[in-house]
Image: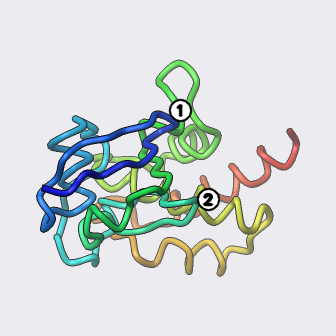
Amino acid sequence: MPMLEMTVNGRAVKLEVDGLCTLLDVLRDDLGLKGTKVGCHEGECGACSVLLDGEAVNSCLLPAMKAHGRSVVTIEGLGTVDDPHPVQKAIADAGGAQCGYCTPGFVISAVALLRRNPQPSVEEVREAVAGNLCRCTGYTRIVRGILDAAELMSKK
């Protein structure tokens, strides 16, 4: 089996993987990072979103070996319960998380957007999260939270 070496949430990882497994499989099954959710396995829902070298990707579609030598950040790598990332806090404060299943994917997509564009418009936020599906919120509060996070982060 091939050896996969990558950085996950700032930690060097080296493990043998089945050449056919996805990055999602490695993160959840081998590394125990359950915050990255299993949704559609088709790249349609965004529940499996992670940052790969700073860009949001669907980990369910990415062969694990494509992450070799690269940096992966999951929702666990962004913040903690005691010290949440500003996007996590702002989405929660805006009431953007109801059941919470889709929230990690939205947070990841929002973080990628705000790193590229610290002051996005409503339309740019909606475009950035277009690959993330939510059945509970209707998106208004999620978008509001992302815009609030942008404002909060610009003051730091």
Q: Nearer the viewer, residue 139 or 55?
A: 55
> 10 Å neighbourhood of mark 2: few (<14), some, or many (≥20)?
some
The residue shown at (46%, 44%) is: 7
The residue shown at (30%, 52%) is: 4
Q: Which amino acid, mark 1? A: Gly
Q: Nearer the viewer, residue 62 or 42?
A: 62
Q: In the image, is 60 to the left or to the right of 1?
A: right
Q: Is residue 29 above or below residue 68?
A: above
Q: Nearer the viewer, residue 121 or 112?
A: 112
Q: In the image, is 81 to the left or to the right of 15?
A: right
Which of discs 1 and 2 lies nearer the camera? The answer is 1
Q: Is residue 147 above or below residue 130?
A: above
Residue that numbered label 1 is attached to: 79
Exactly how many numbered labels are in the figure?
A: 2
Q: In the image, is 2 to the left or to the right of 52?
A: left
Q: Nearer the viewer, residue 106 or 31?
A: 31
| Circle 2 SS class | helix
The residue shown at (25%, 51%) is: 3
Q: Which amino acid, mark 2? A: Arg
User: Which is nearer the N-term, disc 1 or disc 2?
Assistant: 1
In the picture, the quarter occupied by the N terminus is bottom left
| Circle 1 SS class | loop
Q: In the image, is 19 to the left or to the right of 109?
A: left
> 10 Å neighbourhood of mark 1: few (<14), some, or many (≥20)?
some
Q: Residue furthest right?
A: 155
Q: Is residue 70 above or below residue 140?
A: above
Give the numbered dot on residue 144: 2
- Relative image position of residue 20 (x, y in whole percent): 12, 68
- Relative image position of residue 28 (x, y in whole percent): 21, 44
In the picture, the quarter occupied by the C terminus is top right
